[in-house]
Image (spheres, rainbow, N blue to C red):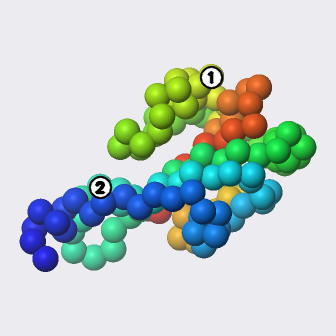
Amino acid sequence: MSKASAAAAPAKTGTDLASLEQVVTLPRRPVSVQWRKALRGTVGLGPTDWEVLAVLEYSEADTQALLATLTPSELAPPSLEDGGWLPAATRKSLEQARAYDASAFYRPPLQNGTVLHVPGTRTFVLSLFTL
């Protein structure tokens, strides 16, 4: 493997729920998903950290039920390193998003991150990563 290909492992993306459920816990079943799994930092010797970014669309009932179980975060919504994957409109809407504790979505080794909800929508953006 050349040094260039090792340094730039491509992100994997998808829209299938089954693949997403293999790496994260979904406390409610979304009606649609888009996800991106990518390495964090540069590839080197030993373990490499990675992240999952997912846009989750829920029914109105499941949106309300999920919001009732999530704990608001005191932190400001993080800036998401998405490599240009998120559509501009989604990125813009996240400026108004409310951050919540994402522990309900954790599945080892993904045990860090946040979930964002844009008020007035049924859309959540989940950002989980390893350390």
Answer whether labels 2 and 1 touch (C-beta < 8 Å).
no
* Residue 60 tag number: none
Three-letter residue code for mark 2: Gly
Residue nearest the viewer, comparing 31 with 115: 31
Mark 2 closeness class: few <14, some 14–19, many ≥20 residues within 10 Å: few
- Helix, strand or loop under label 2: loop
- Helix, strand or loop under label 1: helix
Tell me the quarter of the image containing the C terminus.
bottom left
Report the mark closest to the observer, 2 or 1.
1
Asked if one can make out residue 74 in the rendered structure from this viewpoint, the answer is no
Tell me the quarter of the image containing the N terminus.
bottom left
Q: Where residue 20 appears, x then y in whole percent? A: 59, 64
Residue nearest the viewer, comparing 99 with 117: 117
- Residue found at x 33% / y 74%: 47
Residue nearest the viewer, comparing 92 with 109: 92
Mark 1 closeness class: few <14, some 14–19, many ≥20 residues within 10 Å: few
**What is the quadrant of residue 48 in the picture?**
bottom left
Badge 1 is on which residue? 96
- Residue found at x 74% / y 31%: 121
Three-letter residue code for mark 1: Gln
Q: Where residue 49 appears, x then y in whole percent? A: 38, 64
Q: Where residue 7 appears, x then y in whole percent? A: 19, 62
**Between discs 2 and 1, the one toward the N terminus:** 2
* Residue 41 tag number: 2
Residue nearest the viewer, comparing 35 with 66: 35
Calculate the distance from the C-alpha at mark 2 to the C-alpha at mark 1.
28 Å
**Relative to 31, 109 lies left or right:** left
